[in-house]
Image: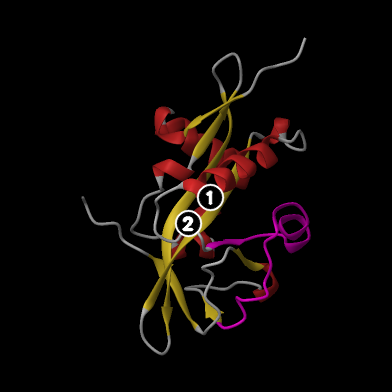
Amino acid sequence: MYEVIALLPLETVDPQAVETLLDRAFGPGRRARTAYRVRLGTSEIPELSFAAVADDGSLIGSIQCWPVALECDGGGSVPMVMVGPVAVQPDRQQGGIGRMLMERALEAAETAAVPGADALMLIGDPEYYARFFDFSAERTGGWRLPGPFEPRRLLARGAGVPTGPGLVGARLRRAA
C-alpha cells in the first residue's frame, strides 16, 4: 500500500508545525543563516508556499517563497522571489518529497500574478538545483547579500533575473 502525500497551501497548516519542521530539518542555528537576513521583515508568499502532508495528517515537508528585490547599485529595484527553505522531516529525506515541493512551487510561479515570479533565486547546492530545476549562478555574480555566502551557491532562474550588481534584500509587501 502506497502512502498518499497531499501538497496543500502552506497557510492551511499550523505555523508552529512548520517551525518545528524547520528546526528538525535545519537545526537550532537556522535563524543565523544569511537567507534569514535576506528575507527579514517580510512574510512568505501564500501563492507559492506549500506543505507536504502525509495521509495521517502529519506535516512532512514544506517550501516557502519570499518577496525579495535586487537593489541595483546604479539605482532602481528589481523584484524577485526567494525560494526556500525546502524542509523535509529528517526521517523522510531522500524520498522525493523536497523535489515534489520544489516542482509545485515552480509550477505555481509560472502562472502566479506575483511581482518577481519570473526572477526566482535561492541559496543552495548548484549541482542539485542546476541539474533538476535549471537554477544557475550565471547572472548572480554581481549580487551581494546581507551576510556571508558562497557565490557559487547563489542561484537564479527565469526571464526576469537581473544581471547587474546590487544588494538582495526583503521586498516589503504593501497591503492591497
Residue 22, numbered label? none
- Residue 115 pos. (x, y %): 39, 59
Q: In the figure, is residue 171 to the left or right of 174?
A: right
For the residue marked with disc 1, what is the amino acid?
Glu
Magenta segment: 120-142
- Residue 137 covered by magenta stretch: yes
Q: In the figure, is residue 108 to the left or right of 3?
A: left
Q: Helix, strand, or loop for circle 1?
A: helix
- Residue 6 pos. (x, y %): 58, 24
Quadrant in which residue 60 is drawn: top right
CB atoms of marks 2 and 1 within 8 Å: yes
Residue labelled with disc 1: 110
At horizontal 47% and vertical 39% (from top left) the residue drawn is 19
- Residue 83 pos. (x, y %): 54, 54
At horizontal 41% and vertical 48% (from top left) the residue drawn is 44
Query: For the image shown, how many numbered marks are present on the structure?
Result: 2
How far is disc 2 from disc 1 in space, using C-alphas?
7 Å
Residue 117, numbered label? 2
Tell which circle, 2 or 1, labels the residue nearer the N-terminal end.
1
Q: In the figure, is residue 44 to the left or right of 94?
A: left
**Residue 119 seen from this side:** yes
At horizontal 44% and vertical 47% (from top left) the residue drawn is 112
**Residue 29 seen from this side:** no
**Image quarter hosting the N terminus:** top right
